[in-house]
Image (cartoon, helix red, strand yellow):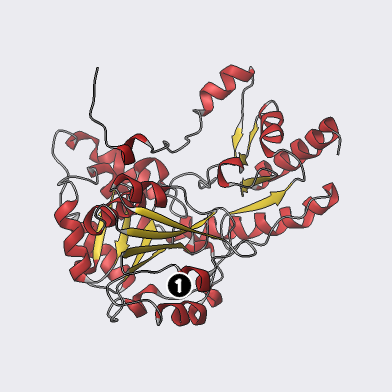
Amino acid sequence: MKLAIPEHIRGLVPYPPGKPLEELEREYGITGSIKMASNENSLGPSPKAVAAIGQALGNLHRYPDGSCYYLAQAVARHQQVSPAQIVFGNGSDEIISLLAAALVQPGDEVISSAPSFLVYPKVAQAQGGVNRVVPLNDLRHDLTAIREQITGRTRLIFLDNPNNPTGTMFGRQAFERFLAQVPEGVVTVLDEAYIDFADPGQRLDIRDYLDGDRPVAGLRTFSKAYGLAGLRVGYGLMPPALADCLHRVRGPFNVNSLAQIGALAALTDTEHYQRTLAMTREGIAWLHEQLPSLGLTPLPTETNFFLVDLGRDGKAFYQAMLKKGVIVRPMNAYGLPTYIRITVGTAAENKRLLKAMADTLAELGQ
């Protein structure tokens, strides 16, 4: 078959997904594995969301509400914004793609950091855009260097705050100094997928910038703190004019009906949300206290995950851990070959992780 595939599409490298848990268990001949690799909610989904979805299963023959009307009203109340400032997507990943589709033409430039979320440069390349990738400085966004990369062709700047995979975050003052130097018309995107886990005293409030002369968009997700990663529902907060542009390029039914119903119920499940935050804080504190006994120093984090520099090949360590039924994330794809990323789990999962790490280090020769 002969296909006229554009060069910028031909050169795209697919996002590296992990294998299904069941397949890994089959390959390694193990059962009862724990997954601490994908920054999911170890408590599971919101019980209220599960109940609401169960009640809605009889309506699957109907198309979803293309406007996400009830969810938009609820999120608007929750965030104290107008529904006109909200765009929903099939996960916040889709909002990233919609921003690129709406704003980036061939030859236009998109700025992101490295290591950072791998999707940012992919969506720019998919539009024929030019990626300007700025290395992190001390595992943090280098806002000064990012500002220096802005040109007359810059259309988007992606800043995940907190950053994935490093867990670091910048605050209000640093952001406002940066934003004041961004030319009008350049859209700055704050990807806040993990903001629920961050120290409230260190956060900036995206709503303070939605009416400014520099367009800013903030991305949120129901995948992490709300435990609905499998439903794929996220949203962006942005100026109405920018939201209108995204609505012009998004699909008419991009958020399925069960995702809308589950997210709407999860938003009211304060108990599950607070339990998630408490579990995460306690797990981070305990693991950061215990890992030095293994000769490892975990990096500080404002998320539900953290990095550890093993001082050895992270992928080999990951594979050895798999045999013990504990799945962590090697950071080779992020340019950090000696690091692994660990998602905080339940107390029992954290203890099992620690034991598996100790045994693996002993086997590999610490």
Q: Horizontally, is 97 left or right of 160 in the view?
A: left
- Is the residue 313 above or below the residue 48 in the image? above
The reply to whether residue 268 is visible in this rendering is: no
Q: Residue at x 77, y 38 (%)?
A: 355
**Residue occupying image coordinates x 54% and y 60%:** 277
Q: From what the image shows, is residue 154 above or below residue 208?
A: above
The kind of residue tagged 1 is Arg
The residue at which mark 1 appears reads as 147
Number of labels in the image equals: 1
- Residue 366, position as x, y percentages in the image: 86, 39
Please state the horizontal and vertical placement of residue 91, each as a whole percent of the image: 34, 49
Residue 325 drawn at (x, y percent): 66, 29
> 336 or 258, which lies in front?
336
Which of the 4 image quadrants contains residue 365?
top right
Front-lying residue, 339 or 320: 339
Return the residue nearer the eye: 256 or 340. 340
40, 85: nearer the viewer: 85
Residue drawn at (70%, 59%) of the image: 285
The crowding category of the residue bearing disc 1, from other C-alpha atoms within 10 Å (few below 14, some 14 to 19, many at least 20), is: some
- Give percent across and percent down for residue 127: 28, 48
Quarter that holds the N terminus: top left
Q: Is residue 254 above or below residue 236?
A: above
Residue 337 figure quarter: top right
Task: Name the residue located 56 percent from the left edge and 41 percent from the top edge.
Answer: 333
Q: Is residue 236 above or below residue 322?
A: below
Query: In the shown orientation, is residue 124 left or right of residue 273?
Result: left
Element carrying mark 1: helix
Q: Is residue 70 visible?
A: yes
